[in-house]
């Protein structure tokens, strides 16, 4: 009898809890649908609102939290068009060596460069960037067509959190496996597993230089401790190394580089990946973390390969990190213990919970929500899925103040426009190039901090003008994959009055709610902001050979980097990441040079009628927000 009463009590409690949860939501039922599609997905496709209305918002959220249960064959078939995405960095380096490698061969051969050599060098340069274009295109395509929308949102979040810059040296060769093997499998898993995968990824090891970090001269190493050389053996080995270096110019350059401890990854691991800038660590902690991670490298160095641990260059001395003692003479397990310590630290729980709340709820997330998300992180040992669930089912998430409170990034804008217009994915670099020209080159942020999550970083006069023009370009058929004829609403409204067309577009794209100013723009066909700032132009749509080479991710900085790539790869010394951060800035995001109004080379064809309404709606403030 007691068991039956307990069962009955549980059955009654669950509906009551759900009812109480819904009662605490300030958004209307339809607002909740549009809200989850804009926050947990890259916007609504035609039919999505109706489907969630039948399924229920909470059931849809629960389904998205388990992407492995969602069939997504169409997406996988499309991504299979990109042959390089399944290759390792080692394979890509073998298939398309960087131009510097060819130049080195020419130098060893002697003589002058022929016209054939120049042509071959240019082709090799294009090939060495082609796979980056394929990866960028696949990222946009997945955001547009994948049924696993929340997983794509989380991949976007983590690839920005664990940012890697494609323009640094050979880092780009390791990006396809970084996306496929490091980030995607762990996007909704545990934070510790994700952190470990990133720490061992060739992309991060190369980008932040840890692959070259070794014990400082005079420090004990595992090999030295286990089998010390006598003086005669050491002298013979040193003489042999010197002889090899003397015969090889490349080894001479390597020998002139400053060898020893590199703190770049250790610093960003603590400041950007785990604890946060105010996480309670010291400079000595950074040094000791760097020492604990010496010997964490790439199997074949600059030639690629998977993760490898080299005990002979690992600093085997004792360390103390965040008050925890690490005894001497430990190897790879020491680095693993450091990652355990950082992943379980209270500051990490707060830092990650805050960033997730900022992504899903508000640029200034409510402290009470952050506290609950932090508690979930700690109570579940960093279960990302559980933390996300806490956030996206909270009253704060469904508060009126959260509705349309976030500004879309360029990536989100392009993906949501294509989804709204029922677009086909594009297998060329053109759509990813549009993301770049709107100011967010994919894998194109130079500093380790990634692109900002707050709206002010994306909105200024030039950015607003570009976004309006992008909407007009989409409605005019200038954006790959988008044709107005394929939009289900076109046939329904094409012959109706303008008032009816405006109402239909507002209902379809905005759930029926826009400002009086936006409605007036759609009714009159006149956007005062556009008129005041020079009218429509198609500068966003103009490609060039360099941009094509970069696979649609060519910001001004990356273009310059690409042109200087061969020379920079042969330099003996590298600027430390700290200098890169200073040059790029930790806060500023500058749109690419190709996206500026002053470089417009032509006007969009004038839009009228239904196409004009759609174009202006896609550029409206309400569509720029999520």
Image: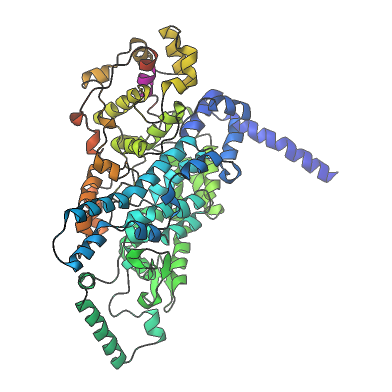
Position of residue 113 measured from the top left corner of the image (x, y, whole percent): 16, 58
Residue furthest to the right: 1
453 left or right of 585 in image: right
Q: Position of residue 466 (x, y in %)?
A: 28, 29
Residue 178, compared with residue 514, is above or below; it is: below
Observer-nearest of 446 and 372: 446
Asked if the stretch drawn in magenta spans residue 616, the answer is yes
Q: Quadrant of the C terminus?
A: top left
Image vertical order of residue 394 relative to residue 250, above or below: above
On-image quarter of the N terminus: top right
Q: Position of residue 2 (x, y in %)?
A: 83, 45
Picture residue at 28% right of the left edge, 55% below the top: 168
Q: In this image, 610 relative to 194: left or right?
A: left
Rendered position, 96 above or below 535: below
* Residue 271 occupies quadrant: bottom left
Residue visible at 46% across and 17% down in the picture: 490
Q: Quadrant of residue 88?
A: bottom left
Which residue is at a point 21% across and 50% down the rendered structure image? 563
**Position above or below: 504 against 562:** above
Q: Main secondary structure of the magenta part?
A: helix
Q: How many marks?
A: 0
Asked whether the viewer can see residue 86, the reply is yes
Q: In this orientation, which residue lies closer to the viewer: 606 or 514?
A: 606
Residue 200 colored in magenta in the image: no
Residue placed furthest toward the top: 497
Whether residue 281 can be seen here: no
Residue toward you, 165 or 421? 421
- Is residue 406 found left or right of 258 in the rendered image? right
Question: Colour scheme of this structure image?
Answer: rainbow
Image location (x, y in percent) of residue 395: 53, 34
Look at the image and give the residue range highlighted in magenta: 614-619
């Amino acid at each position: 009898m007691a068991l039956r009463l307990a069962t009955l009590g549980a059955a009654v409690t669950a509906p009551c809890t759900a009812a109480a949860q819904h009662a605490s939501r300030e958004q209307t039922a339809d607002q909740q649908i549009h809200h989850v599609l804009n926050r947990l997905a890259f916007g609504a496709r035609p039919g999505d609102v109706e489907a969630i209305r039948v399924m229920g918002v909470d059931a849809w959220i629960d389904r998205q939290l388990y992407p492995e249960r969602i069939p997504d064959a169409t997406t996988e078939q499309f991504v299979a068009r990109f042959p390089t995405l399944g290759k390792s960095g080692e394979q890509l380096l073998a298939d398309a060596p960087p131009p510097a490698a060819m130049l080195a061969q020419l130098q060893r051969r002697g003589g002058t460069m022929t016209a054939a050599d120049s042509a071959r060098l240019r082709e090799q340069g294009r090939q060495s960037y082609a796979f980056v274009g394929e990866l960028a295109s696949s990222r946009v395509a997945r955001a547009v067509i994948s049924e696993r929308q929340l997983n794509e949102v989380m991949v976007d979040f983590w690839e920005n959190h664990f940012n890697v810059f494609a323009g640094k040296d050979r880092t780009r060769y390791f990006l396809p496996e970084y996306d496929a093997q490091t980030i995607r499998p762990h996007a909704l898993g545990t934070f510790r597993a994700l952190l470990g995968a990133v720490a061992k990824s060739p992309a991060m090891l190369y980008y932040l230089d840890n692959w070259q970090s070794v014990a400082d001269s005079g420090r004990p190493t595992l090999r030295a401790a286990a089998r010390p050389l006598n003086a005669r053996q050491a002298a013979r080995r040193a003489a042999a190394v010197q002889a090899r270096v003397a015969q090889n110019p490349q080894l001479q350059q390597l020998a002139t580089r400053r060898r020893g401890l590199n703190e770049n990854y250790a610093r960003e691991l603590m400041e950007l990946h785990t604890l946060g800038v105010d996480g309670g660590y010291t400079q000595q902690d950074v040094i000791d973390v760097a020492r604990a991670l010496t010997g964490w490298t790439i199997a074949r160095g600059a030639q690629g390969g998977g993760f490898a641990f080299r005990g002979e260059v690992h600093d085997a001395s004792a360390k103390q990190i965040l008050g925890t003692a690490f005894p001497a003479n430990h190897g790879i397990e020491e680095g693993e213990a450091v990652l355990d310590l950082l992943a379980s630290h209270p500051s990490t729980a707060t830092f990650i919970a805050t960033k997730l709340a900022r992504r899903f709820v508000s640029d200034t997330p409510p402290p009470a929500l952050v506290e609950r998300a932090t508690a979930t992180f700690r109570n579940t040992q960093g279960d990302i899925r559980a933390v996300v669930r806490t956030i996206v089912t909270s009253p704060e998430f469904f508060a009126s103040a959260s509705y349309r409170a976030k500004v879309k990034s360029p990536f989100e804008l392009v993906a949501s426009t294509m989804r709204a217009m029922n677009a086909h994915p594009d297998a060329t670099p053109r759509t990813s190039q549009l993301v770049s020209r709107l100011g967010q080159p994919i894998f194109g942020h130079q500093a380790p901090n990634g692109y900002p999550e707050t709206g002010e970083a994306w909105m200024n006069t030039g950015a607003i003008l570009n976004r309006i023009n992008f909407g007009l370009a989409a409605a005019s058929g200038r954006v790959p994959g988008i044709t107005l004829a394929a939009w289900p609403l076109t046939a329904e409204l094409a012959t109706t009055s303008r008032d009816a067309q405006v109402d239909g577009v507002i209902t379809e794209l905005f759930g029926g709610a826009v400002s009086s100013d936006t409605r007036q723009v759609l009714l009159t066909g006149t956007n005062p902001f556009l008129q005041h700032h020079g009218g429509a132009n198609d500068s966003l749509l103009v490609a060039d050979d360099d941009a094509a080479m970069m696979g649609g991710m060519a910001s001004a900085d990356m273009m310059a980097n690409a042109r200087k790539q061969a020379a920079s790869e042969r330099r003996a010394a590298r600027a430390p990441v700290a200098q890169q951060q200073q040059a790029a800035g930790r806060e500023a995001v500058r749109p690419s040079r190709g996206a500026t109004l002053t470089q417009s080379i032509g006007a969009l064809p004038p839009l009228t009628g239904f196409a004009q309404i759609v174009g202006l709606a896609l550029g409206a403030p309400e569509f720029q927000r999520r």
